[in-house]
Amino acid sequence: MDVALSVRDLRAYYLTSHFGVEREVRAVDDITLSVEKKEIYGIAGESSCGKSTFIRTIAAAIRPPLRVLGGSIRYSFLDRDLYDLDERALTEMRWKHLSCILQGSMNVLNPVRRVRESFKDFASPHMGLARSVFFDAVKAHLNRLRLSPTVLSAFPHELSGGMRQRVAIALATVCRPEFIIADEPTTALDVVVQKDVLALILEMQREIGSSMIFVTHDLTVHANISNRLGIMYAGRLVEEGSTRDILRDPMHPYTRHLIASLPRIGDVTPKKGLSGAPPSLADPPSGCRFHPRCPLAMDICRQAHPELTALAPGRRVACYAVSPLVQPAHEAAAARKATKADKSAAFLQ
Amino acid sequence: MKEWPRASLLGAEIEFASMRTYARYFLRRLGQFVFVVFVGINIVFFVTHATPVDPVEQAISSATQFGHSDPRAVEIMRKALRELYGLDGTILQQYVRFWTRLATGDFGPSLSAFPTPVSVLIRQSLPWTVGLLFTSTLIAWGVGNSLGGLAGYYRKNRLLKAVGIAATGLQPIPSYIMSLVVLILFGYIWPILPISGGFQMNVSPDLSIPFVSSVIMHSILPVLSLVLITIGAWFVGMRSLVSNIVTEDYVVYAELAGVNRRRILTSYIMRNALTPQLTGLALSLGAIFNGAIITEFVFGYPGLGTLLVRGVNSGDYSLVLGIASISIVAVATAVFVIDLLYPLLDPRVKVE
């Protein structure tokens, strides 16, 4: 399979300095993942686990104090790293190749302009069509999303929440981008509209053939839409695998707790909450960031962060308790370097 | 084929219905307007009549201050003056007379410049005040909002930061200090501009080039001091409005979509910040009929402010009442007009 997005060792921190006190919040720490073409990659995790920061980073929408400190982000449609693009190339790339559907789509449309103007501002520079042809294309697209073309002459406040969400999806897909980033697009909607909107997103994604990163804390939504799932905890990816595998057989203790918290029909045992609170990302726990809340915590968990290790095809887990193959991250990195050095040495000889 | 999901309030068939609701809205606002004007003028009537300065006694004392006069003659004079000034009878009779006269647009004769009608005095001063304040209000509003908007958007810009410090520094300075500082700077230390009056005495007041240029030269210093006082509030207001709007979802989303920067600044940020500022502008434009009392007085400008001070000092109820009534009507009209325009400026304001 071709890779649409490959993220390597991405680190993005919030760096602030107030009255000489330097503070860093490690919202995204050493994340490595890749999204294949035409795939929907789901990211799950509780609030403040760094999901939104990750999204902002790969969408090149960072603003100080958030800063990217290391790693690379490569999209298949770009010939270089995302952060090596200049302002103009970035503007050109946006929406044409990479678009977003945001959390709170209720408020993503300018309240004092008609929907028509938003389409013109967002899409027309990328489509390069004459005015009438452009609006014909937009209307055809709205048609596919089962939206009446009259929404174009409406103001956002005149549309219901579900319709605004549809308009936002139409806006994000009208240029047929290769990659779509969806950040909690269904969170503020009621369940009935949610189902409708999910179906719509799925339909659009299939039709355009774009790849997608879909972020939500709601695992039931992931079960319906995501092909693969990455579980984030405290700024790190702790487990990754196909949605099916993860929901059936979660390996990381945190994932297990997440899945166990889901209600099941017929299950009447009371749900137990995880003790403790999510760690502060300004001062994360040493070693594995989950260890203060982990029932399986061992000595090594407190000392060194476990490497996200491939344990089966397409399955990666970062937990010492799951398999002896999981090594501390720094040792794994050293080992990688060593094998690389061996290889190049062998090549030189 | 599937039924379209319909948006509310779309299409021409609903236009008509909204026209009717707009008419209802108009009538309700008109009622409010009339009520506000009525209450306001009443308050001014009773407040001015409660002043301890009696214009009749003032006129008598200035007539009798030289030499002896017969007490009976003084009594007759007092009675005659009371009748002439329209001050005979109870306060209730005066009140009824006042309203019947006002209905015909007559504020009665001025008591301090008897028998010139108040309306004539006001008509002479009004163009000066309106010209002065209209210009300075528009300049301060335009410049203050543009710079404030830019400062809210480009928070890091050094020059705009300096402008911000200057604007916030100027804002709390009282108008009499500002007027005096401007006067001393440009009239005394670096005497390049005239410091008093509305135009040069030896120029005849007609529409000739020397007269117009004289009026402009005389207005520069008062306009400058008025602009310097008011620009800070517009700047600070706009800057904080914009820095809030910058974090709104629709701005972030437009930036994510790579929408043209200038378009974002104008159509997304400024356009949304402008509505409250336009209300403020309408209120300030309405308030220009009060005259800029202190600034006009300092610069000896022949406007409403100077006239009002004269009226208050000489106990000239009719004049004070006339000026106050005009400014009440003007402010109420400004609010009325902006209320009518608001549904057009901000589509979210429903007219029901």
Image: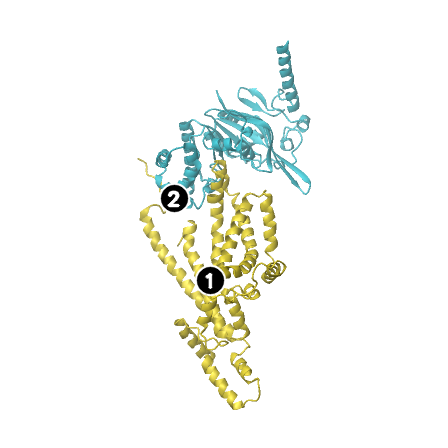
Chain colours: A cyan, B yellow
The residues tagged by marks 2 and 1 sit, at their Cα atoms, a distance apart of 34 Å
Residue linked to disc 1: B331
Circle 2 marks a residue in which chain?
A: A
User: Between A175 and B136, which is closer to the camera in this rendering?
Assistant: B136
Residue A347 is left or right of residue A166, and the answer is right
Q: Quadrant of the C terminus of chain A?
A: top right
Q: Are marks 2 and 1 in contact (CB under 8 Å)?
A: no
Q: Position of residue A141 (x, y in %)?
A: 37, 34
- Label 2: how many Cα within 10 Å (few below 14, some 14–19, many 20+): many
User: Between B17 and A203, which is closer to the camera in this rendering?
Assistant: B17
User: Between B231 and A335, which is closer to the camera in this rendering?
Assistant: B231
Labels 2 and 1 in the same subunit: no
Dot 2: element: loop
Q: Position of residue B76 (x, y in %)?
A: 49, 88
Circle 1 marks a residue in which chain?
A: B
Q: B183 above or below A254?
A: below
Determine if residue A160 is in view: yes
Residue linked to disc 2: A154
Q: Amino acid at mark 1?
A: Val
Q: A339 above or below A58?
A: above
Q: Amino acid at mark 2?
A: Ala
**Mark closer to the observer (2, 1):** 1
Q: Quadrant of residue B25?
A: bottom left
Q: B164 above or below A214?
A: below
